[in-house]
Amino acid sequence: MQAARLTHATLHWRADGDPNGPAVVFANSLGTDLRLWDAVIDRLPKHLRLIRNDKRGHGLSSCPKGPYSIDDLANDALELLDHLGVETCVFVGLSIGGMIAQTLAARAPERISALVLSNTAAKMGEAQMWQDRIAAIEASGIAALSGAVMERWFAPDFLSTDAYIPWRHMLERTPQAGYIACCQAIAGADLSETTKTLCQPTLGIAGSADGASPAALVEATINLIPDAQFTVIEDTGHLPCVEAPEAYAGALLEFLEELGHV
């Protein structure tokens, strides 16, 4: 178990594969930790340097006082790259992780050689929606909303099995203050203008049954980036890396092959 003490947070991180290989960095969604990527990491070549972390307010990372901004979270990501000696990487971000990816790629384009923007958007929902969610959590806790969240995260077939239960537990055990502070970050973010300036090779990934970031919303963001690719993983919700890791890893591998990393 490893931790990086940064300026404003201490992040729990993990690296798999070859420490000298091409770096691929993964950023998690709201309410999940770095285990989100377990099944994908297992399916990727071992010559890659595969890095992931719990963002602030989640998992085993510290939970500084909120509110947070996407800029704060992108600063953490950039500091972590510095801490790990990563000069350049392919950055894979899902949901809020994709917003971090867009921000980081605009701010430090020399550090991000390519992007995978998964189940995300330049703007995710209206501020009032997030304020309503925050109010509900403050009144009743995350567990009171977890059933509705599961329906956005996963397609019906996955929800009909017991496989979703650990993910519900992960959500419910997220520090409430950290979850709320990240909701505030999403509520305050519209990255449309800066995302239009991105020029890195980009792959967009959506789930056909995503109730949090519908495929059309993801595609609209991908269309802001010149020559970006877009794919939909069928019969998956907001976390296709969990529901269909083989398909997800396959899409990622094909993209990495085009970049010459595989």
Image (tube, rainbow, N blue to C red):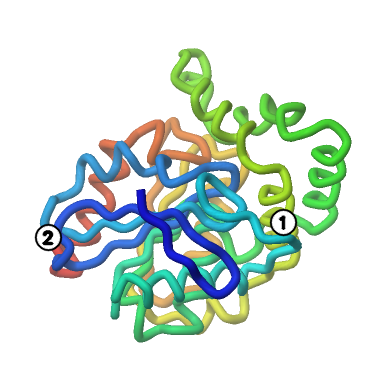
| Tag 1: amino acid | Ala
Rendered residue at 67%/60% (across/down) = 64
Numbered mark located on residue 78 in the image = none
Q: Quarter of the image containing the C terminus?
A: bottom left
- Marks 2 and 1 sit apart, C-alpha to C-alpha, by 37 Å
Rendered residue at 58%/55% (across/down) = 62
Q: Position of residue 199 (x, y in %)?
A: 39, 81
Using the image as rendered, state which of residue 147 and residue 207 is in the foreground.
Answer: 147
The 10 Å Cα crowd at callout 1, few under 14, some 14 to 19, many 20 or more, is many
In the rendered image, the vertical position of residue 80 relative to residue 12, given as above or below: below
User: Which residue in the protein does label 1 denote?
Assistant: 181
Using the image as rendered, state which of residue 47 and residue 223 is in the foreground.
Answer: 47
Q: Earlier in the sequence, mark 2 or mark 1?
A: 1
User: Which residue in the protein does label 2 denote?
Assistant: 262
Rendered residue at 27%/53% (across/down) = 252
In the rendered image, the vertical position of residue 117 relative to residue 173, given as above or below: below
Q: Position of residue 113 (x, y in %)?
A: 30, 76
| Tag 2: amino acid | Val
- Tags 2 and 1 touching, CB below 8 Å: no
Q: Is residue 204 visible?
A: no
